[in-house]
Image (tube, rainbow, N blue to C red):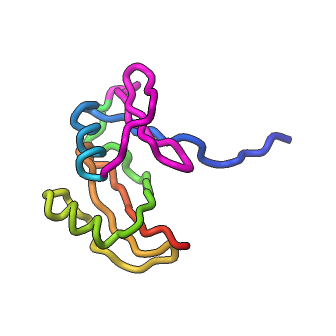
Amino acid sequence: MAKLIGPDFIALQVRDLEASKRFYIERLGLSLADRSPPGAVVFDTTPIPFAIRAPLVDLSASERLGWGVSLWLACDDADAFHEQLTAAGVTVLSPPQDGPFGRFFSFQDPDGYVVTLHTKKG
């Protein structure tokens, strides 16, 4: 029987590829990967590649993208990131707090996706 291994690549469909690219580079400090396919922007993240892409479906058919999806990104200091994003006017949904995966907080990206940053333990 075939066995599922786990997440291997994460991509969000976004309304404005350039605006979202700027957000993830300027606000979160991500770097671009060496290559991206047409209509997509791949970031240099490990262990799982993360990308944004032009929509494959009609995103205007939904008021809120990614409703119910939770995207967690690891960082080295959730409190420092919270301060940076708050100062930049990013919509923070929950303040920094301690959880089972380390210190974390949640915010919205330009398309309204809920993203949680957490301080990676160990």
Q: Residue 25: tell me if it is visible.
A: yes
Task: Give x and y (percent) for residue 15.
Answer: 27, 32
Instruction: Answer with the quarter of the image where residue 91 lies.
Output: bottom left
Q: Identify the residue shown where x is 65% and y is 49%.
A: 6
> For this rendering, which residue is in front, 8 or 60?
8
Task: Give x and y (percent) for residue 58.
Answer: 33, 26
Q: Identify the residue shown where x is 24% and y is 51%.
A: 27
> For this rendering, which residue is in front, 64 or 56?
56
**Residues shaded magenta:** 29-58
Which residue reaches farthest bottom? 98
Q: Identify the residue shown where x is 41% and y is 66%.
A: 76
Q: Residue 60: tell me if it is visible.
A: no
**Looking at the image, is 51 positioned above or below residue 106?**
above
Which image quadrant: the N terminus?
top right
**Looking at the image, is 74 positioned above or below residue 10?**
below
Apparent side of residue 34 relative to residue 27 in the rendered image (left or right): right
